[in-house]
Amino acid sequence: MEIQTNFSLKNFNTFGIEARAKQFVAVHSIAELGVVLQEYKTEKKFILGGGSNMLLTQDIDALVIHVDLKGKKIIKETDDFVWVESQAGENWHEFVLWTIEQNFGGLENMSLIPGNVGTTPVQNIGAYGTEIKDTFESCEAMKIENQEMKTFTKADCHFGYRESVFKNEVKGQYIITSVVFKLTKQNHNINISYGDIKAELAKNNAETPTLRDVSNAVIAIRQSKLPDPKELGNSGSFFKNPILLKTDFEKIHQKFPEMKYYEVSATEVKVPAGWLIEQAGFKGKRFGDAGIHKNQALVLVNYGNASGQEILNVSKNIQETVFKTFGIAIEAEVNII
């Protein structure tokens, strides 16, 4: 465990932004994490997972702690269910593929989402009709202030759309060290409610789809729309899909009858932010080395040497134009640092 100074974070964020950390350390066990937090008690700290959900707009004047805890295991099972614990530093997509190999169901729709397991509850990540909260059982977290471990149950996490207690009430107070998921062993709930998945499965003649079929369909869809961060810097979806009250939406819908939407509840609808951005004319546009991906307007990209500030400026331009055009505010899903 070595503390490094003036450390480049270019390879530790999926946008590939060149930013530097005042100090940097990677921790590989809960014991190491406790020691670092105790010994550097008075230092300002920045917790880094897979670096997939952030935009660095400046150097980090703090001790960056890279949570690199590895390991996964079955902690309990019945005939129908299995409880699997993954350490926070495991790569999310690799973990999802591992669960599919074991024929454990529940995470297949979230294949190929970038990042590590430990950050998934923070955002309540989701894709193609499923969210972390659907399979989340609990997580272990260390309190930064006193290094005490705490278990957060699903109820404790206050999950919402891309929201949790870790983004709100206890923001910056805990470091998630492991997560437990409750997955199915049989009678899997195969969720193909999203049209893209149905079409992809039909293309592959998968009439009775397996977990792997669903995962492969999701991977194919994501690869057709989303660039690989190793080849083109990005953090996946940059914006949240806005959720509007039906009464407000109906007024906007009268003006824009072609606007796509999904019912969320009896009183709310979700509008695809990608559709709004595309209609506002941004899909495929480039501003220097910052731009919007040609296949998916939700994805902002770094074509090589864009700064975080340049990408942030593009995102603000998009937000202002979408609001001016449709009267709908869209929020960044990515954390702006």
Image: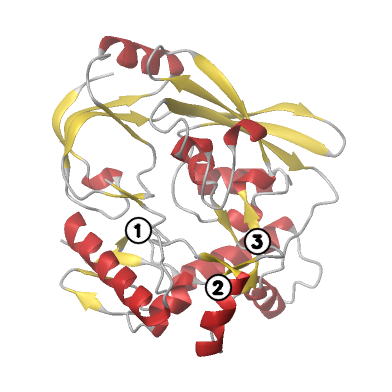
Residue 213: give x, y in percent of width and height: 69, 63
Task: In this rendered view, identify the residue nearer to me: 288 or 29.
Answer: 288
Secondary-structure class at tag 1:
loop
Secondary-structure class at tag 2:
helix
Mark 2, residues whose alpha carbon is within 10 Å: few (<14), some, or many (≥20)?
Answer: few
Among the two numbered marks 1 and 3 on one chain, the one whose residue lies closer to the N terminus: 3
Residue type, mark 3 in image: Gly
Number of the front mark, 2 or 3: 2
Residue 230 visible? The answer is yes
At x 55%, y 46%, the residue is 124
Does 40 sit above or below residue 69?
above
Q: Which mark, by number, is residue 248?
A: 2
At x 17%, y 49%, the residue is 18
Q: CA distance from mark 1 to mark 2?
A: 37 Å
Residue type, mark 1 in image: Pro
Task: In this rendered view, identify the residue nearer to me: 149 or 180.
Answer: 149
**Residue matched to label 3:** 129
At x 55%, y 73%, the residue is 248
Quadrant for residue 318, please give it. bottom left
Residue 224: give x, y in percent of width and height: 48, 73
Q: Residue furthest left?
A: 6
Residue type, mark 2 in image: Asp
Secondary-structure class at tag 3:
loop
Q: Which mark, by number, is residue 10?
A: none
Among the two numbered marks 1 and 2 on one chain, the one whose residue lies closer to the N terminus: 1
Quadrant for residue 32, please give it. top left
